[in-house]
Image (cartoon, coloured by chain):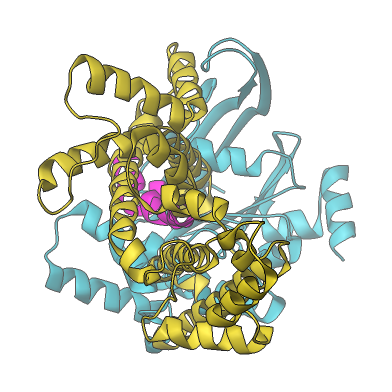
Amino acid sequence: MSQQEDKKLVLEVKNVSAGYRDGGFAGHGGTYHEVLHDVSFNVRHGEILGLVGESGTGKSTLARVILGLLKPEQGEVIHYTPRPQIIFQDPYSSLNPTYSAWWSVEEPLRIFGKYDEKERKRRVGDMLRKVELPEECYEAKPEELSGGQRQRVSIAAALIRRPRFIIADEPVSALDVTIQAQILKLLRSLRDELDLSYLFISHDLNVVYQLCDRVLVMKAGRIVEQGTIEEVYNHPKEDYTKRLLEASK
Amino acid sequence: MMKYVLKRIGMLVVTMLLVSFLTFLAFELISGDPARSMLGTNAPSYQVDALRHELGLDQPFFLRYFKWLTGFFSGDLGISYSYRQPVWDLIGSKLMITILLSLISFALIVIISIPMGIFSYQWGGGPFEWIRTSFNQLCMAIPPFFTGILLSYVFGILFRVFSPGDFPDLYEEPGAAFLHLFFGAICLSIPRIAMTTRMMRSTIVSEMNKAYVRTAISRGNDRRSVLVTHVLKNSLTSVVSFLGQTMAEILAATIVVEQVLGIPGLGRFLVLSIAQRDYPVVQAIVVILAFWVVLAGTLADLINQSIDPRLRLGGDLA
């Protein structure tokens, strides 16, 4: 245990509570609905941490808080790596339909503005090879790509500025099973090659079992159980975890 | 791309053939005999029959349609019943005026409402939102004839900037003619500027809620660059289609505005010719106006598919 704790952290989430307001006027007043209650966990360097739970338990809200898109009411989020990035669930709608694959992957570098055109070209070409997108797809618009190809483009765009920590929000849920396996394999090999750490959000316990090192189980905005995959899957402590595992068999 | 253009042009030709046939058929079905109305109710029937023969009205329907259609392609639009002159000589200069009027209106709409839509998105909301919304609704509700009367009074009678009812010759005094048309264009465009602005704004709002915008923000875009690089391009397609339809509405509204401001365009002549049962004139005008409308729609589609290739594939944009 102490060995694991010695490992460098990439993310620390401390006692975070967060939620949404509805009603009210211009963002003030209204009723506060708390979604996350006192959530704490760490992501360690080089690991793939799974986050499982039924839909509506606050997994995506947690992702928004970690990325700074939603301010927590209480607690804090500490990033130990610069430029965390996210891969979204639906590759069909998360790419701008009017731009090519190459354009979407190059965009973060253009915004960053530090590289000239030649260097951008080198980096984009390099990254598209890493995610194994066929060369004939480079100039294709999202409409002309398959779901798996689109997700490869999204992954490349997320990785192009070399982040060290990635949130993957249900990245394979919209894909069919054989494509799922390919993308999971890609995510794992990219982790090794580019020295990444992931927070992998999923409602699919089988996918988490295939990919992750550790897992958090979330229920109604609280983390009810966490541990290594073996601990949680073989010796679940909580009834909720047992029921989830039972349901996924 | 080329294939799509050809397909679209093919559709245009088929539409025009249908329009021309329906126009011709409509006047066939309308009761009343042009020869009789030209000669008056007291004319002896042998004279009416002679005139019918002279005008070719005693020939079978399809033969007359075919002759008219082939004439149309060779630039011969027939002879006006009332004026006994070639139709083209009567409507050529009027067509020019109406097309100029609708083009100026259209340019005003595009130049003003697209930036206004973007501005009202960027700086909309806030406590004064209701002022903007009510002003927009007011502008939408102003009928062109009313603006026409108002402008005639203020700029025609009080300030004498132009003389309503006395349209200067387009070739001799192009400046004055243009100014006169400009006032007409203001009447035509105010309600449509309001509509297009609102349309532009609501399209931007709905695009802003799409998933690709969320991705764009997470990849480092700020609000402004999301709007400029991502959302505007996707918003333009629906605005371009809307503008294509607007062209048809402008054309319909020119008829009234030409009456109010005394602009000698096609619209005014059309109303007159219908009253006189001058079928060759009416048919020619209807077909030319229809062509203009269909052409605007086709251009809008072609522009759209060059913006967004999904339209070329015939897929829906849901």
Name the residue rendered at 32%, 34% in the picture: B186
- Residue B219: say if magenta: yes
Residue A221 in sight here: yes
Depth check: B16 or B4 in front?
B16
Q: With B284 as the anchor, is A19 left or right in this view?
A: right
Q: Quadrant of residue A192?
A: bottom left
Magenta range is: B216-245
Residue in front for this viewpoint, B198 or A144: B198
Whether the magenta-drawn stretch holds residue B88 is answered as no
Q: Name the spot of residue A161 as percent of width and height, x first.
A: 29, 59
* Corner quadrant of residue B108: top left
Query: Residue B188 vs residue A3: left or right?
Result: left
Q: Is residue A245 above or below residue A119?
A: above
Is residue A15 shown above or below A164? above
Instruction: Indicate left or right for B258 with A20 as reference.
Output: left
Main SS of the magenta segment?
A: helix
- Does residue B16 lie above or below B259 as drawn? below
Q: Which quarter of the rendering shows the N terminus of chain B?
A: bottom left
Is residue A8 in view from this perspective? no
Q: Nearer the viewer, residue B204 or B225?
A: B204
Whole-percent x, y for residue A157 in the image: 38, 63
Q: Residue at x 36, y 20 (%)?
A: B150
The quadrant of the image that shows the C terminus of chain B is bottom right
Chain letter, yellow in picture? B
Chain represented in cyan: A
Depth check: give the residue in front, B22 or B310.
B22
